[in-house]
């Protein structure tokens, strides 16, 4: 998947070239890879964890891990697929190691100031984030990758090391659960 305005083939080719240079010890190429993907890393972490502070921590860990893990990138898949897998694994490990499932549901988000509609929108967003944080891990991962990050079912299946049907099923269950939990907001 590429950013709007970028051509996927050129983007993947640039990543491949940068990865090759970074594997050879070129710090500039590594820094360029990080620059190109840091927003995506943070966004996935935030959506997986629901906390900006935790997302910052995980994003920093991923950036550090990338440098040492670069030699393990075989190049058999797109760099972004490999990167998503690292981010998702870091998030899952962070959740398991730092907080219980119930604590994540109680994450405080800054209040939204302004007219009543903005306050209600902020409350709805908080309710949505809490609902996402209560999803089982496999469903949450599928929802974040496909629904929020825009990956195809095939790409999400590659990241999660499952098949497309499994991703579709998990996503359908996640959507049904969220619809049920958010019915009071519609």
Image: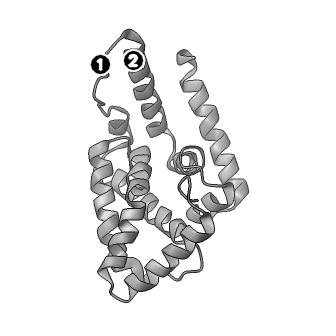
Q: Secondary structure at mark 1?
A: loop
Q: Give whichever of 106, 150 is nearer the camera.
A: 150
Q: In the rendering, at what x and y percent does residue 76 appear?
A: 59, 80
| Residue sitting at x 60%, y 63% | 7
Q: 17 left or right of 55?
A: right
Q: In the rendering, at what x and y percent does residue 45 appear?
A: 40, 51
Measured along the vertical axis of the image, is residue 181 above or below residue 85?
above
> How far is disc 2 from disc 1 in space, using C-alphas?
7 Å
| Residue sitting at x 51%, y 74% | 14
Q: In the rendered image, which quarter is residue 153 located in? A: bottom right
Q: In the rendering, at what x and y percent does residue 47 appear?
A: 43, 44
**CB under 8 Å between discs 2 and 1:** yes
Q: 180 left or right of 72?
A: right
Q: Secondary structure at mark 2?
A: helix
The circle drawn on residue 113 is 1
Q: In the rendered image, which quarter is residue 81 located in? A: bottom right
Measured along the vertical axis of the image, is residue 35 above or below residue 146?
below
Measured along the vertical axis of the image, is residue 182 above or below residue 133?
above
Dot 2 corresponds to which residue?
118
The extreme right residue here reads 165
């Amino acid at each position: 998947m590429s950013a709007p305005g970028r051509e996927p083939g050129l983007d993947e080719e640039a990543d491949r070239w940068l990865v090759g240079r970074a594997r050879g010890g070129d710090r500039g190429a590594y820094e360029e890879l990080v620059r190109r993907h840091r927003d995506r890393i943070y966004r996935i972490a935030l959506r997986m964890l629901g906390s900006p502070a935790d997302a910052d921590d995980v994003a920093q860990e991923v950036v550090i891990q990338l440098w040492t893990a670069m030699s393990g990138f075989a190049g058999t898949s797109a760099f972004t697929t490999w990167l998503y897998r690292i981010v998702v694994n870091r998030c899952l490990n962070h959740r398991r190691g730092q907080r219980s499932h119930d604590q994540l549901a109680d994450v405080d988000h800054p209040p939204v100031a302004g007219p009543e509609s903005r306050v209600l929108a902020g409350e709805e967003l908080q309710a949505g984030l809490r609902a996402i944080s209560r999803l089982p891990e496999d469903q949450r991962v599928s929802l974040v990758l496909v629904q929020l990050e825009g990956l195809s079912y095939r790409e999400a299946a590659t990241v999660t090391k499952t098949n497309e049907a499994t991703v579709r099923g998990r996503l359908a269950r996640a959507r049904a659960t969220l619809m049920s939990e958010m019915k009071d907001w519609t």
